[in-house]
Amino acid sequence: MEFDYVIVGAGSSGCVLANRLSTDPSVRVAVIEAGGRDVSPWIHIPVGYFRTIKNPALNWMYRTEQDPGLNGRAINWPRGKTLGGSSSINGLLYVRGQPQDYDGWAQRGNSGWSWDDVLPYFQKSENWNGPDASERGQGGPLTVNQSHNTWPIVDAWVEAAQEAGFSYNNDYNSGDQEGVGFFQQTAQNGLRCSSAKAYLAPVRQRSNLHIITRALVEKITFDGRTATGIMITQGLQKTHIKARKEVILSAGSIGSPQLLMLSGVGKPDELKQHGIEVLHAANGVGKNLQDHLQARPVYKVNLPTINTKTRGLLNHLSIGLQYVFNRSGPMTLAASLGTAFLKTRPELSSPDIQFHIQPLSADDPTIEMHNFDAFTASVLQLRPQSTGEILLKSANIHDHPAIHPNYLSERIDQETIVDGIRCARRICRHQPVSGMIETEYKPGPNVPDEDYDGLLDWARQTSTTIYHPTGTCKMGHDPMAVVDETLRVHGLDRLRVVDCSIMPQIVSGNTNGPAIMIGEKAADMIIKDQKATTAGGHHS
Ligand SMILES: Cc1cc2nc3c(=O)[nH]c(=O)nc-3n(C[C@H](O)[C@H](O)[C@H](O)COP(=O)(O)OP(=O)(O)OC[C@H]3O[C@@H](n4cnc5c(N)ncnc54)[C@H](O)[C@@H]3O)c2cc1C
């Protein structure tokens, strides 16, 4: 059990590393995953996220602590627990974010992370099946499509948004995000293209790549300040896996900080509370938690939506047959179809809100759909300023950490979510969608636009995560930064973090594409370092 590189977590970023680092047959790579193999058909059928989101065999089933910003509610925080990680249970939506996001990271001193620097890694990862564009990539492992699905109510909403004065954008991933249009999705031949499907499946046979599943990593082992490997537990058996070159944490925004803290890397007084010996004081571990919170206005409509179109045995049968024979129909739906990236204030230099338009509705995305026809115009703030934290509950890896998202604690976040709801309403007042709407079901006519406090309270009472936790091992050079721009943990040797937790500021969009880009860029840096070390004839 000795490898050159030991990767913790086979998620969106981890699978990329496993593939790229094992390209050289002389380099031995292990990737360790707590979940099992991705054999469930519900992982691969796109719409299977409706099932996997409730399945503890594929999902960590985290739950937040009671959040003051949500009127004291605790909410579900699903995370994937299988090969592919969260990319195996996510909504398939592909969004890169805004150039300004990455330029902002670079301006904070993270050289090499500007938009111009990261674009080649987005392109390298991608196999784009859409109109030719110089910003897109061809021939990469991750297949990205324009959605082939249309749904009348979503088409009508996209038209209404244009009537409301917003321009159409046929590729929000081109570097100019602003406008209204349709989502792109990570799918291939009617099947999900997870990070495991894209990066692991094609190289599984490499004899220098070891994929170890159902193995829970308990902690990182150190010799002084140098990471030497990890301890894993499989049932009752504990094993030490040694890393000759590096340990790379890709356990995600909850798993990576949890493992650092359990290994003695974190805020000293918090570690001591749980009897953990402090190896290295790093006050930022688990802090700077950012997520996208979605407010979900729902409109009752006078035409069929998925709510009723998928009810009953006959509908199930015909949908199933359509999928089996044509790989089309509702089973190939990504989590949302229509989107818009808009500004709530004209003086903004780039969009600050995003819409997810779904031809269905439910009181909560993880429970039953309504039994009447309706659609959801979910809206979120792209760059919230509220930050939360992940704290240990105990020194035991089996105990989920305490998640404090601290949503809507900043005034600008409160104002933006209210303006987002008002913007949803403004669009719905335009044709053709206005002619299809019977009533606004939520927030409803008793909370008018002028009632700022009422709208904010409704957002606090009903909003949910859209599953994008980031930032808990942030990259940078200030005292709260955990990793530097090469993603090495400050103050320690042979240890990197490579996943969504390194984002210094959450990106303006869904986070799977960026997690895969981070994996590509990290792999490139690691391989270059290795070549430099070999050429120099010494080990770092
Ligand atoms: C329900 C849902 C819907 C989403 N929808 C979208 C979407 O439509 N579009 C989009 O862009 N993004 C979406 N996201 C977000 C996106 O998928 C994630 O941001 C991204 O996958 C995170 O990548 P990661 O590499 O940081 O972590 P993950 O992909 O979560 O990988 C972490 C891996 O580490 C493993 N792990 C953790 N701890 C340990 C341990 N101690 N030992 C061993 N293994 C461990 C986990 O099991 C997991 O496999 C969604 C997420 C969810 C959960």
Image: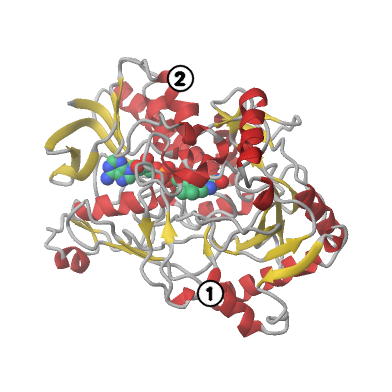
**Relative image position of residue 165 (x, y in whole percent):** 85, 61
Q: Is mark 2 within 8 Å of ligand 1?
A: no
Q: Identify the residue under disc 1.
A: 460
Residue 357 position, x and y percent, is 68, 54
Verify CB contact (< 8 Å) between mark 1 and mark 2. Answer: no
Res 111 visible: no
Drawn side of residue 343 relative to residue 517, left or right: right
Vertical relation: 185 (above or below) 105: above
The percent position of residue 4, horizontal first and vertical second, equals: 25, 27
Relative to 461, residue 200 above or below: above
Q: Position of residue 327 (x, y in %)?
A: 64, 27
Label whose residue precedes the other's in the sequence (1 or 2): 2
- Could you say whether the residue bearing mark 1 is in a helix, strand or loop? helix
Q: Give the Cα separation between the discs numbered 1 and 2.
A: 44 Å
**Which residue is tagged 2?**
202
Q: Residues within 10 Å of mark 1 (few under 14, many from 20)?
A: many
Secondary structure type for disc 2: helix
Q: Which mark is residue 188?
A: none
Residue at x-position 59% and y-position 52% = 509
Specify the quadrant that holds the C terminus: top left
